[in-house]
Image (cartoon, rainbow, N blue to C red):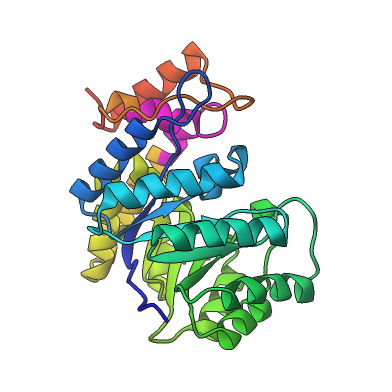
């Protein structure tokens, strides 16, 4: 079994850049990786839901991850998310990731169709047992399938290669129950939304898989550094700043604000892939104004 790398601190959920014709902009993706490594993040996360991964086919999910692994050159670990709507598709993506030499994979519930908890656990067990790579589980309500704390516990208890939990429920009863059930020296409990990082860290989480860090890594690194130092006043102040950044970047359609802001700070991340939409001029002006007020752009 492969040794499990650590993703404690800030792991960046990479955005997928596209050219104007909808093709993947691999040159911009390599630049995104280089900027993240230079900023000092703990790891890189590919094909998260915010990465426009649902607009990629299975081969493209593997190809984008191959680009990230090559660009990272072992300087930080790469965790690749298994996004699929069926077991055969998930297994194809998993095999592709294994061939690339990723450091870990993340298992995600299938999307759209509702799956009962026993069937969801069977699906996740099948994938975890099909690989020797360290695995995580991404509990993403956006898929239409949220794993209960009991299902999460059974997944971890039954599969010794499952070490990471990416929390995106924003349900603190769920979070506290899951923490109680799966906490241990071999488990890294990682927050999965920038909105609640300081709260999850106070409860005992070890880090965050952040989308904001794809654009403003320093803001998220300041939060986790303060938390790790036990300076909760500074951590809360950093969280408040992150929330203001998040509010600005969420202006307009899905993720378009993040890509626009990345261009403003000299790290262009290309276009949205249709049918996802770009910002209107008014939305772009609002984001630029709000980021200027935060001192993040000139």
Vertical relation: 1 (above or below) 145: below
Question: Is 263 placed left or right of 135 in the picture?
Answer: left
Q: State which quadrant residue 94 falls in.
A: bottom right
Q: Nearer the viewer, residue 240 or 264?
A: 264
Q: In this view, does 290 lie above or below 122?
A: above
Residue 219 showing in the rendered view: no
Vertical arrangement, residue 257 with respect to residue 233, above or below: above
Q: Residue at x 35, y 21 (%)?
A: 289
Q: Which residue lies furthest to the top in this view?
A: 281
Question: Looking at the picture, does residue 17 appear above or below residue 111?
Answer: above
Residue 98 visible in the shown view: yes
User: Image quadrant of residue 40?
Assistant: bottom left
- Does the segment drawn in magenta span residue 72? no
Residue located 47% across and 63% down the image? 98
Question: Does 247 lie within the magenta span?
Answer: yes
Could you tell me residue 54's position as x and y percent?
61, 42
Q: Which residue is located at x 41 percent, y 16 percent?
A: 285
Which SS does the magenta portion mostly show?
A: helix
Which quadrant would the C terminus be assigned to in this image? top left
Q: Which residue is drawn at 42% across and 82% down?
A: 1
Q: How many labels does the image show?
A: 0
The stretch of residues the image draws in magenta is: 246-262
């Amino acid at each position: 079994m492969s040794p499990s790398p650590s993703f404690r601190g800030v792991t960046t959920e990479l955005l997928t850049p596209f050219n104007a014709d909808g093709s993947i902009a691999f040159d911009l993706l390599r630049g995104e990786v280089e900027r993240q490594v230079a900023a000092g993040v703990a790891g890189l996360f590919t094909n998260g839901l915010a990465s426009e991964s649902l607009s990629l086919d299975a081969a493209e999910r593997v190809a984008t991850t191959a680009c990230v692994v090559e660009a990272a050159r072992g300087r930080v670990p790469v965790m690749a998310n298994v996004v699929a709507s069926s077991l055969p598709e998930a297994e194809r993506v998993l095999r592709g990731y294994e061939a690339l030499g990723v450091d870990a994979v993340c298992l995600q519930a299938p999307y759209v169709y509702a799956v009962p908890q026993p069937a969801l656990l069977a699906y996740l067990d099948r994938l975890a047992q099909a690989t020797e790579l360290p695995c995580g589980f991404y509990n993403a309500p956006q898929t239409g399938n949220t794993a209960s704390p009991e299902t999460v516990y059974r997944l971890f208890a039954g599969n010794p290669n499952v070490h990471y939990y990416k929390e995106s429920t924003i349900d603190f009863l769920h979070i506290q129950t899951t923490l109680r059930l799966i906490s241990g020296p071999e488990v890294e409990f990682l927050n999965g939304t920038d909105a609640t990082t300081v709260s999850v860290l106070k409860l005992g989480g070890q880090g965050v898989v952040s989308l904001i860090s794809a654009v403003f890594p320093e803001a998220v690194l300041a939060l986790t550094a303060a938390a790790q130092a036990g300076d909760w006043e500074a951590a809360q102040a950093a969280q408040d700043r992150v929330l203001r950044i998040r509010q600005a970047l969420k202006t307009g359609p899905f993720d378009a604000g993040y890509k626009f802001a990345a261009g403003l700070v000299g790290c262009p991340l290309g276009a949205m892939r249709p049918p996802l939409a770009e910002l209107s001029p008014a939305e772009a002006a609002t984001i630029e104004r709000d980021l200027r007020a935060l001192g993040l752009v000139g």
